[in-house]
Amino acid sequence: MLPTENRLRRREDFATAVRRGRRAGRPLLVVHLRSGATDPHAPGESAPPTRAGFVVSKAVGGAVVRNQVKRRLRHLMRERLTELPPGSLVVVRALPGAGDADHAHLARDLDAALQRLLGGGTR
């Protein structure tokens, strides 16, 4: 489970990450990353935490399958939060094949997408 401060919940935050962030697609998922931009007018000196959200549509499978995919993705993302810049917004969108994939395949695709986004690869 992701800690509360690392959860992406507001619709506006999802839209910001998807529309203004960079995107990397893999066979099982698409990752949108909006790198952290600190607000100079925000009070306090600490950088905002990295936040992640997940989109798993009915195309992935039934309710049980969708929840299982979300749990796996949350667990995988929790381990990778420290690799991302502070204040980043991440949206992970599962594609239909994610419902049939095992944990290792999801991890491999997530790592590849994040590496592409953080490494400065092309779209």
Image (spheres, rainbow, N blue to C red):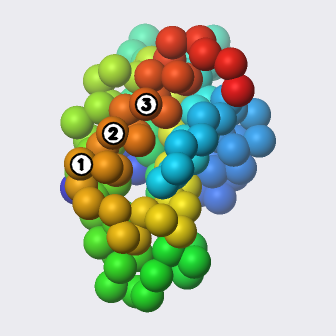
Question: Mark 2 sits on what residue?
Answer: 108
Is residue 16 visible to us here? yes
Pick the front one: 44 or 121: 121
Q: Is residue 47 above or below residue 66?
A: above
Pick the front one: 46 or 63: 63
Q: Residue at x 29, y 72 (%)?
A: 68
Mark 1 and mark 2 in contact? Answer it, CB < 8 Å.
yes
Q: Secondary structure at mark 3?
A: helix
Identify the mark at residue 10; answer none if there is no mark.
none
Mark 3 and mark 2 in contact? Answer it, CB < 8 Å.
yes
Horizontal and vertical percent for residue 26? 53, 43
Quadrant occupied by the C terminus: top right
Q: Residue at x 63, y 51 (%)?
A: 14
Horizontally, residue 75 falls left or right of residue 53, namely left
Is residue 91 visible to us here? no
Look at label 2 and name its amino acid: Arg
Q: Residue at x 43, y 12 (%)?
A: 45
For the residues marked 3 and 1, what is the alpha-carbon distance in whole angstroms?
Answer: 12 Å
Look at label 1 and name its amino acid: Ala
Q: Is residue 110 above or below residue 115?
A: below
Question: Mark 3 sits on what residue?
Answer: 112
Q: Residues within 10 Å of mark 2 (few under 14, many from 20)?
A: few
Horizontal and vertical percent for residue 109? 41, 41
Look at label 3 and name its amino acid: Ala
> Which sits earlier in the primary sequence, circle 3 or circle 1?
1
Identify the mark at residue 104; answer none if there is no mark.
1
Q: Is residue 15 above or below residue 37?
A: below
Q: Secondary structure at mark 1?
A: helix
